Amino acid sequence: MPRSLSRGVSFMSSEGPGEFQEEAPRPVQARRGFSVSYQGKTLLSCLDPIGQADRLAGAQKILDRTLYLCPSPLYGYGLGRLLERLEQEAPHSALLCVETDARLLALSQSRIDPSLLNHPRVRLTGERNPAGLCTFVQNAWGSRSFRRVETLRLSAGWRLDPKSYDDLAAALGQELVLDWGNAMTLVKLGRRYIKNALRNLSLIPRAPSLGELSFYDDPVLVLGAGPSLDNILEGLADFFGEALFTAPPRPFRIVAVDTALPCLRERNIKPDLVAALESQHWNLRDFIGGGSWEIPVAMDLSALPATGEILGERTFLFYTSWAKLSLFSRLEAAGFLPKTFPPLGSVALSAAAIALSLGSGPVLTGGIDFSFTLDTYHARSTPGHRDRLRQQNRFRGILNAGAAFRPSAFGAAAKSGLPVRCDPAMRGYRDLFEREFAGEHRLGDITGNGLPLGVPVLDMAAACQILGAPGSGPHTAADPETKWPATDSRRRGALGEFVFRERDALVRLRNILIGKTKVSPEELEGMLDQADYLWAHFPDCAGTGGRRPPGTDISFLKRIRAELDPFTRLWEFTLGELERYGER
């Protein structure tokens, strides 16, 4: 929070009149310990600051797996008492001390007992950036270590910067919610992700990495499938006319999410690239009728394998790092891992990240709404909208009242100022979009009835002016006549050897678990770490950053044993696919 000019400044100066000197923290001897005066405020009790802080620490309700945030700890009074209670009552809780004032931070670093600051369950930091503090906590204690954040004020130092401390506590709480939400996603879908990735490995010799595609400095339009997409496409058609339907002469590139593909096909607007991340079968209907288009697909390595074949096998691969697995580290070391993007959860966010990575020109977004209205959840012609039309009869209308008025839905204001509906999941994606892209100077958003994304908003006329100024590079990357790379036999052979080694590692681990092969406990632990994709989706392991039960845990080993045979067969299937494509 920006401070006022008079805050923290003393008008008494030994340098002469008209000059200012910043006030330093002034300790005052109390009956027990020291009080502190700073910026015109008394920050600790003038009578018994140690006793008062100990009483506050003693009265605090202690819960396990809780991160206790102590703003402005000053001399650290009460921390020893709190830590003693944590060790007795909450073996998995920790204490985070934060000081946003540099002078008070120096005071704390010099006066707090070193045995406290060096304790593994205590950290002191001056980080005042919410994202930086979340990273600090994750580096200190790892993911999924805590379930809640509790603020414990042992001094009045927090009153010097209350908004910053409130923002930091809120950010930590949101980060915990995100961590646990991601963990639940991995529990439900993690096994599907890794199964898809292993099957899609056979595409690597014949599908280039997305990093090999370039849009040079051409403008790029990223299209989502929100309700505002219809008006945006009409505005583009009015401005560009026939040039909109073919690239070239269309002066800009189009990157569309898979759900927007039916809307574009109905209008005969052929995109330059389609982004697909869905790991299940739900989005296959987005591609129905589009096989003759032969549009390049930017496909996640963990997407449904059928996605790579449905549009004529013109596939660019990329990888979303949904979990830190040693398997992907080995793939990267061997040169097989395609271009990597951070996990963003939404295909619209990933499409924006892809567009920004493909060139140096301006990138505009449209139809990425993260909101809906009573009668439109997606744009016209999308499968979901068509389902609503098909289900309409005398007793069931087009209005989606179930979605609009469910308890979790709420009203919001769109970029255009009109009221729309939203829900916590959509709001979370919007917030993530702003956090990821708000500082990207090349990115803008076309106005419409969607939520503001935290980037500059352009009206249709301004957006068309930007899109109508083509770049200087060649404009042929998405042409159907472009020859697609043939299967690389040398690369296929190297990948086959990699897959063979991975399959043999699982066979050996199986022999160990059934007692056929004897190894040392250390070697077993190493093999379990190497095969982390077998257990990364277990409820007690998902989202923990690689933490797992020890190799002496029989229940854990039994669960590993249940995964071995299916994954061994999956490696063998991938080997067969590599051989089949090698015979073409």
Image (cartoon, helix red, strand yellow):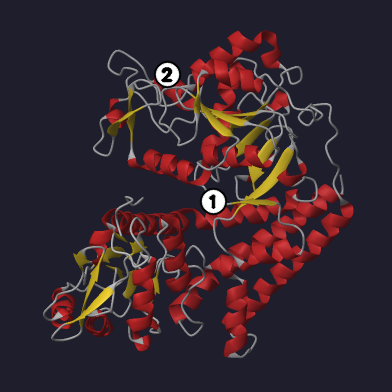
Mark 1: which secondary structure?
Answer: loop
Name the foreground residue: 51 vs 348: 51
The tag on residue 172 is none
Image position, residue 235 (x, y; %): 55, 13
Image position, residue 495 (x, y; %): 79, 60
Point 51% across, 82% down: residue: 551
What residue sits right under mark 2 in the picture? 390
Assign the C terminus to one quadrant of the image. top right
Image position, residue 142 (x, y; %): 45, 70
Name the foreground residue: 510 vs 193: 193
| Number of numbered markers | 2
Point 60% across, 14% down: residue: 267
Q: Amino acid at mark 1?
A: Pro
| Image depth: mark 2 or mark 1 in front | 1
From the viewer's perspective, tell me whether residue 213 is left or right of residue 481: left
Q: Is residue 15 above or below residue 341?
A: below
What residue sits right under mark 1 in the picture? 343
Residue 301 at least partly seen:
no
